[in-house]
Structure formats: C-alpha cells, structure tokens
Image: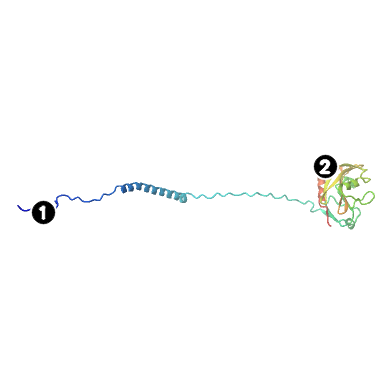
Amino acid sequence: MEPSNPSLENQPNQSQSIPTYQPSTPEQPIKQRGFLLPIVGILVILLVLAGGSYYFMKVKAPITAPIQTQTTLPTTQPLPTVVDETVNWNTYTNLKHGYVIKYPSEMPINTFPMTETQLQNTNSIAFSGMRTKVGVEDSGVSLYINVPQLDAYNKPVTCASDDECIKKVLTDPGIDTYSKKIKDTKKNILGKVRKGVEYVELGSSYEPVNQIYVFSESGKVWYVSIKWTKDHVSKLDDINKLFDQMLATFKFTQ
C-alpha cells in the first residue's frame, strides 16, 4: 500500500464549487430613483405648459390697441356783434362848452337864424323832427340841451344835487304853473345816471310830454329835455331808443 500524500489531502476538491463573492447592491437608491422620475416629468410638463401659455399670450394673442379717449373742450360761443346804428349820423360840436353829440337825419338841428360859428358857440341847441303837423313845433319830437341853465330871472342856477337842481327849475314861473308832473325818471347822460322828472304841458292840444334832467357837471348846471306828443305814444319805444342813442354820443371833448 502506497503512503498517502498529505499535501494532496489538504487540497480542496476541485469538483466542489467555490462560492464567489458578490457584493450586495442596496435597494434604497433604486427606489428613490423610481420616485423622482415622475416628479421630474411633471415639472417638465408644467414648464412646457407655462412656456406655451406665455408664447400664446405674448405672440399669438392679438394686440389690442389702447383705447384713446378724446377730450371735448368746451366751445365758447362767439359774442354777438354789436352794430353801431349811429356810425353814419351827423355830429354837432359845441366849442364854447366843449362837447359833441350825434344826431340822425330825421332829427336835424333846429338852427334858427344862426351861422355855423354861432351854432358852435351857443348855449342852447335843439334837435327836432317827426312832426305830425307841418310847421307846428309842438307836434314833433325834440331833444334840447342848454348850459348854463338860467332861472326865471336870467341868472345861472346854482345847485349841488340832481334833486336840488330839478326842484329849482320846476318851481320857476311857467313850468310850475303850466305843467303837471307825471313821474320821476332816470337816464344815462354824460356817463352818469341822472334823476329827472316827466311832466305834461297843459294848454296844448298836442299834449306835449317832457322829461327834464338838470344836473351839475364840470362846474356848470346842465339842462337836458326830451319831448314827444300824444300822437307819438304808439311809437314811444322807438322814440326812447332814439333818445338813448343820441344821449350815448353826448360827450365832453375837453
């Protein structure tokens, strides 16, 4: 019998399988990757949708022009054109007392026998016309200016106020005796509102109505009278307008 070889005995049997070492792979990372993938996908989808919406709103959406509001400015109405009806009237100039007044052709100067020089230096001037009877002064319309006003004794009237001036003139013999007061009146004369009185003359078939205005201005007492008759009552508005137009041109030149 052959002796056994110890070295052989200690060698492993080659027919036996030798286990191989395989490191174990942890399962946790695999699970985490499986969980993250859906989240990433959702985020990508959201980003795509957001980008598409932005593109649609900014590029594809129609551009709407800004609404322009038109401000309507208030329109100013043109002022009515004032027609000067006295532009073609004649002008009377008084050099002695320094005033002018315009008059229409239907109210000429009642010249009496005066020259041009005398007219320019007279104390009294009268404009008359519209007579209902030819040659009869009382049947017409007139405007009369006198300065300085004299009393019944041919002395200049002295007064401070309109009321005082009128009272002195009305108490003169003649006016006080042959007239009847109707009412108090007012008119704009020489740039101021003047007090006056309206009265009817007694004893005339034409019943002349006078308005007199007596006032102190520029150191002198002025007497202004306007007159019409009962035959002019139907045209009284036009006549008063005519008087107002004439008196509006009554102005100082010095």
Where is the C terminus found, in terms of image quarters?
bottom right
**Mark 2 highlights which residue?**
234
Q: Residues within 10 Å of mark 1 (few under 14, many from 20)?
A: few
Q: Nearer the viewer, residue 123 or 39?
A: 39
Image location (x, y in percent) of residue 220: 88, 53
The image quarter containing residue 94 is bottom right
The kind of residue tagged 1 is Pro
Question: Which scheme is used to colour this image of the protein?
Answer: rainbow
- Which callout, 1 or 2, points at the residue further toward the start of the chain? 1
Q: Nearer the viewer, residue 115 or 26?
A: 26
Mark sitting on residue 99: none
Outermost left residue: 1
SS category of the residue bearing label 1: helix
Q: Residue at x 84, y 42 (%)?
A: 233
Q: Is residue 65 left or right of residue 219?
A: left
Label count reads 2
SS category of the residue bearing label 2: helix
Image location (x, y in percent) of residue 62: 48, 49
Q: Nearer the viewer, residue 191 or 103?
A: 191
Q: Kindly tell me whether residue 237 is visible in this rendering.
A: yes
Q: Kindly tell me whether residue 213 is visible in this rendering.
A: no
The kind of residue tagged 2 is Ser
Q: Are marks 1 and 2 in contact (CB under 8 Å)?
A: no
Image location (x, y in percent) of residue 125: 88, 52
**Mark 1 highlights which residue?**
6
Q: Is residue 86 left or right of residue 31?
A: right
Image location (x, y in percent) of residue 45: 39, 48
Q: Residues within 10 Å of mark 2 (few under 14, many from 20)?
A: few
In front of the other: label 1 or label 2?
Answer: 1
Alpha carbon distance from label 1 to label 2: 173 Å
